[in-house]
Amino acid sequence: MQSSKPSQPNRPEKTAAILDGAMQVFLEQGYAGTTMDKVAAAAGVSKPTIYNHFQDKETLFNALMEKLVLEKEWAKRPPDLQHFSSEPVNIVLKRIANEMIDNCINSSEQMTFIRLVIGESGRFPELSRSFVRNMDKPIIGGLTEYFASQDIPAPEVAARTFVGTLIFFLMTSEMMGGKDIIPIDRDYLVDNLINMILRAEVKVK
């Protein structure tokens, strides 16, 4: 039956349905509790259909991470950043910082997904490695190339400093409910982070 429909694995609406169903199940059941049967039920497709699209549960989980990267624009890739080359660096960085923060704060699904990865990383270390590979590496790489193109010294360190500061802010203030314990104004943080990176450029020159 599958051979009579060779185009089935490439149908975008099926892929979207599977990913939506998988996200629902992963968030509700965790990685260990998720099965292809449960994903099939949530997505309204057969289990063979899922296997036509995704090799196994890990492949499906990785696809969800890639989907988040693309949809939420966590990873500003080099081609995207090249469009900003004519704009002042501080304006570009403020835009990226605000997008990263807003994308997380405005998506409870995204927040829960990150908690899922962190919570399951002890039992499933490949999950956390995949998260770093699909989520963190693209944005670090994109920012590193952008900083290098703008002659900012130690571009990879600058990229890690930029992203790491924002992630720490999100984790402590939003994910762990600590905004009243170590409060800091968001605009104050972003503006001074950018100024710190740009001042480093001036000192080296």
Image (cartoon, helix red, strand yellow):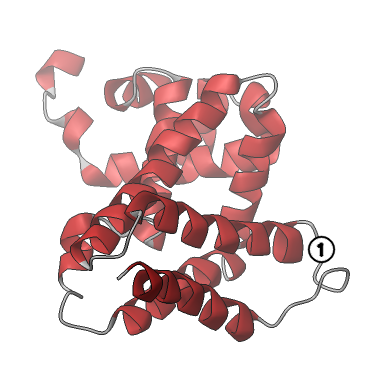
Image point 83% across, 64% down: which residue? 178
Q: Is residue 160 left or right of residue 124?
A: left
Q: Is residue 133 left or right of residue 187?
A: left
Q: Is residue 192 left or right of residue 7?
A: right
Among the 4 quarters of the image, the one containing residue 170: bottom right
Q: Where is 34 relative to 181, above or below? A: above
Q: Where is 183 relative to 52, above or below? A: below
Percent x, y for residue 46? Answer: 40, 26
The residue beneath circle 1 is 177
The quadrant in which the C terminus is found is bottom left
Image point 30% across, 65% down: which residue? 152
The quadrant in which the N terminus is found is top left
Q: Amino acid at mark 1?
A: Gly
Image point 47% across, 22% down: which residue? 57
Give neighbour class at mark 1: few <14, some 14-19, many 20+ (Cα, 10 Å): few
Among the 4 quarters of the image, the one containing residue 73: bottom left
Residue 163 or residue 43, whichever sits in front: 163
Percent x, y for residue 83? Answer: 15, 72
Residue 60 or residue 95, whichever sits in front: 95
Q: Is residue 16 left or right of residue 113?
A: left
Q: Residue furthest right?
A: 181
Q: Is residue 98 visible?
A: no
Residue 101 or residue 147, whichever sits in front: 147
Q: Where is 164 relative to 23, above or below? A: below
Image point 61% across, 46% down: which residue? 114
Percent x, y for residue 47? Answer: 42, 21
